[in-house]
Image: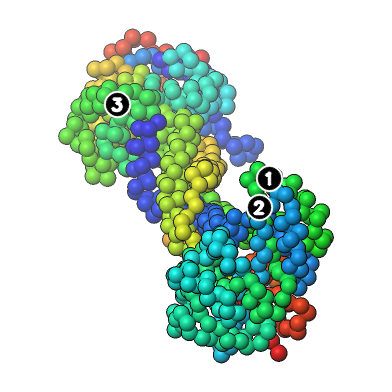
Amino acid sequence: MLRLLRQVSFRQLQASWGRTTLVVGGVATGVSLIVAIQVINASVLDNLRRTIELIAGPAALEVTLGVGEVGFSEATVETVRADPAVAAAVPLVRGTISLADDPSETLQLFGADLTAEEDLERYRISLTTDRREVLRSMDDPGAILLAEAFATRHALGIGQHLKLSTPAGVKDFTVRGLLAPAGVARVFGGQLAVMDLPAAQLVLGTEGRIDQVDVLLRPEADVTTTQRRLEAALPSTLQVARPEQRGAQYETILASFQAMLTGLSLLCLVAGVYIIYNTTSTGAVHRALVIAGLRVTGASADQLFRLLMLEALVLGVAGTGLGIPGGIALARLLTGLVSDSMGVIFQLRFPVDGLSIEASRQVAIAAIGIGAALFAAYFAARRVTALDPLEVMRADLRALAPQTGTYRLVLAWLGLVGVSALALVERRSRDTVAAPVAFRRRGSGRGGKPLSLGHAYGCHDRGGRACSRHRNHRGIAHREFP
Amino acid sequence: MIELRHVVKAFGSGETAVRAVNDLSFVCPPGSFWAMMGPSGSGKSTVLHLIAGLTPPTSGSVLVDGADVAKMNSAEAAALRRRRIGYVLQTFNLMPFLTAAENVGMPLVLDGVKQREVDARVKDALAMVNMSHRAAHYPTHLSGGEQQRVAIARALVIRPAIVLADEPTGNLDRAGGRVIMDLIHDINERTGVTVLLVTHDPVFAAYARRVLRLVDGALQQDMPLTEESPDGDIGIAG
Ligand SMILES: Nc1ncnc2c1ncn2[C@@H]1O[C@H](COP(=O)(O)OP(=O)(O)OP(=O)(O)O)[C@@H](O)[C@H]1O
Ligand SMILES: [Mg+2]
């Protein structure tokens, strides 16, 4: 059989290389798109998860507000601390502030207890300035730490002053330290400011109120039991959740994104299968005379059927072999784009440090590609080997083969690939617009639990203060203060 | 040994039905060299197809070495063609993408014969038709006569019991035809293979020891040309 493959199949494949290219290319295109989409999804999700872990820090549980956006009482911290399993409870406030003279330059303001040095460690707030010096100067209510990138962009150095518009009005601040582009600062793409908790509360107009309590448990404590106990001890408006649950919520949002992309890649594969079917069947009809000749020479129909299937296997493997690295290369190109647009959607910039390539997934995709090639070849091979060799030799071959020219097929294939690519790009940009609406809807569907960090960190209406809020088309929240 | 017993082969049905072979019977003993003549459409090719198991008879039986070809399944018929019957067609039916040697070796490759043996037998077969010097050439680089000699080598490489040749000289000029006929004659003499030849040309039919004339699928005339038939007993059965 291998000799036949070498002598009969390979020679013919070589002779009609255009057709061969088309078949291999069809499989390769379908497979590479599926691989690319799968790798992009996996990579983006993995990095998102890592980012969420980074933000959550070592907290085992988070206490957040279930309904409404007004923050909750600081006294909650004491209730949490009173639980025997709790090692530490860290209150946090968050809000959005902007440069007084350029309202489009927003900063995520993060208020934490900075006098507790371990909080800095915990939240991976890395300073480029000397730590002790910074901590000493933080008593000043106007002291602020800025992400290095932001400070550089606005030519701000240590000790320099800046005006920021805050919910409490335009205020003066002094830069006391710079945040290295790592950890949380990196997550927000440099749009981050950190203040001491009381000062931040003052600036945000939420004295005595906080947005979140991060709960650290003792090593022997059981998370679920403690979660239940805290839920019972705290007012029912507060939610106690594991940080990774937030990741799960992201995944729900991503799932639709992912389903759409997977659908598209399957479409490409279907197109690939169609092309393979078409080329193998026209190719087979083309070769009907050869096959008839072999039958007269003593080949059995079964033998030739097996030969054609083996040939399809070889072509499928070749296409898959090209498609998988091609898909990975495509993923390398596109992952940045996708994570950027996700960053816009979720107000959460996260670097994609590496591609997540799962061998088992790739094997499964390879199986799909090869299976598709075999599936497509099956019918054509059945048909052509079932032909009566005498009929074939009598008949006018052109009447037997309703020919679609190779070039037209190549064009059709390129067209399909082009349309799919366009659809991809188009859908992606539309998705970018549609997503904030989607997560808002979902958010309210779940009783107001904030679904995105952008939402949770960004836009809280504090203390009933009048504040109009709208989102621009990319989902970035702006606040305007009268 | 080829035996046809009241063979009928009809194509189509009803009013348009054609009896390509109409109640034909004969016994062709081993080592014979017979020619079949007759006007176009008289069923000569169909008789060869029936013997090679390429198409089943409508009624009657076709026996090759005592086995009923009509009762064989397609795989058995393929094996018969691969191992027992060398078929030479009017159109040469060589694979254009294979060299002369590869074309000749194809029935052996299909039969799973080891490559070393294939090579040896191909060499012998090409030598028999004086084509050794063209072994590595592709059919498109060979003349019509040379292509036909390669096709004959392919029929011989399996060491067949029977060679069926359907107008092997049809595409050749008289001189080229003579070369082929001399070759076939020679091979029949030397190897004792049974040859059943279809031809329109009485000159070439004269190479045979017996000529059957078909008209409308039936035997119209049966002419022994020489007395020196291999076993001296060429009978018309039925
Ligand atoms: N597959 C078929 N379907 C219908 N009719 C057929 C088929 N094969 C052969 N015939 C008919 O059977 C008759 C005999 O055909 P065959 O090819 O055996 O003739 P032939 O003697 O070989 O003619 P030629 O000398 O032209 O080659 C013809 O009338 C032909 O049209
Ligand atoms: Mg004929």
Callout 2 secondary element = strand
Amino acid type for the residue under numbered disc 3: Gln
Q: Residue at (47%, 55%) from the top-left corner? A: A355
Q: Residues within 10 Å of mark 1 (few under 14, many from 20)?
A: some
Q: Which residue is mark 2?
A: A87
Q: Quadrant of residue A77?
A: bottom right
**Separation of marks 3 and 1 at Cα, in angstroms:** 74 Å
Q: Position of residue A431 (x, y in %)?
A: 62, 69
Q: Residue at (51%, 86%) from the top-left corner? A: A161
Vertical comparison of A62 with B81: above or below: below
Vertical comparison of A223 with A37: above or below: above
Residue A471 visible to an observer of this rendering: no
Q: Is residue A90 left or right of residue A416?
A: right
Callout 1 secondary element = loop
Callout 3 secondary element = helix
Q: Position of residue A262 (x, y in %)?
A: 59, 56
Q: Which residue is mark 1?
A: A221
Return the chain for callout 3: B
Q: Residue at (56%, 90%) from the top-left corner? A: A101
For marks 3 and 1, give the one nearer the viewer: 1
Vertical comparison of B78 with A110: above or below: above
Amino acid type for the residue under numbered disc 1: Ala
**Separation of marks 2 and 3 at Cα, in angstroms:** 79 Å
Return the chain for callout 2: A
Q: Which residue is mark 3?
A: B115
Which numbered disc covers residue A481?
Answer: none
| Ligand 1 lies under 8 Å from the Cβ of mark 1 | no
Instruction: For the residues labelled 2 and 1, say whether their Cβ atoms are less than 8 Å apart.
Output: yes
Q: Residues within 10 Å of mark 2 (few under 14, many from 20)?
A: some
